[in-house]
Image (tube, rainbow, N blue to C red):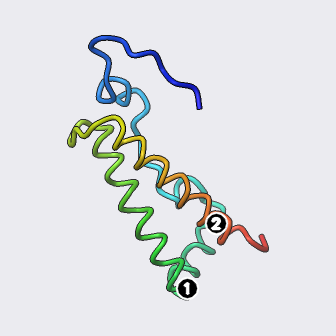
Amino acid sequence: MARRAIVPGDDHRTRSRMTAGKHDLIHEFPEFRERIHELKLGDAHFARLFAEYHELDHEVHRIEQGVETPSDVYCEELKKKRAKLKDELYARFSAGA
């Protein structure tokens, strides 16, 4: 992954206002809305992963909005965890589609 140059006065709160947005699975994958709903009801592991993803997404969104102001390192770790969970969830709900 490419590293950004550090510019004085530039931090995640400034950068993220331009890219802030929720990444909830229903809005990102509307074509799988029914399948996601079925899995949330019938697959406890999927439901747990979905809840964990939702919590991470909410926390990242709050950081991007400037409500919370942790370090850039912490924010990047959250985003990596969210991406990994999204990949795992996507693989589960898109299987057999």
Can you say which quadrant of the picture contains the C terminus?
A: bottom right
> Label 2's element?
helix
Q: Please state the horizontal and vertical placement of residue 82, each as a whole percent of the image.
A: 48, 54
- Ranked by sequence position, the earlier of labels 2 and 1 is 2
What residue appears at the point 63 percent right and 74 percent down from the top-left corner? 35
Kind of residue at disc 2: Phe
> Label 1's element?
loop
**Residue 43: which numbered mark, if any?**
1
What residue appears at the point 37 percent right and 24 percent down from the top-left corner? 15
Q: Please state the horizontal and vertical placement of residue 22, each as a whole percent of the image.
A: 42, 48
Q: Is residue 4 left or right of residue 75?
A: right
| Quarter of the figure with residue 55 | bottom left
What residue appears at the point 22 percent right and 38 percent down from the top-left corner? 69
Q: CA distance from mark 2 to mark 1?
A: 15 Å
Classed neighbour count for the residue bearing mark 2: other residues with Cα under 10 Å, few (<14), some (14–19), many (≥20):
some
Can you say which quadrant of the picture contains the N terminus?
A: top right
Q: Please state the horizontal and vertical placement of residue 3, each as a whole percent of the image.
A: 52, 24
Q: Is residue 84 left or right of residue 48?
A: right
Q: Please state the horizontal and vertical placement of residue 76, each as a whole percent of the image.
A: 42, 41
Q: Is residue 33 left or right of residue 97?
A: left
Q: Is residue 9 left or right of residue 93?
A: left
| Quarter of the figure with residue 68 | top left
For this orientation, the residue located farthest to the top is 8
Kind of residue at disc 1: Asp
| Quarter of the figure with residue 87 | bottom right
Can you tell which of label 2 and label 1 is closer to the viewer? 1
**Residue 32: which numbered mark, if any?**
2
29 and 6: which one is in front?
A: 6
What residue appears at the point 64 percent right and 63 percent down from the top-left corner? 90
90 and 33: which one is in front?
A: 90
For this orientation, the residue located farthest to the right is 96
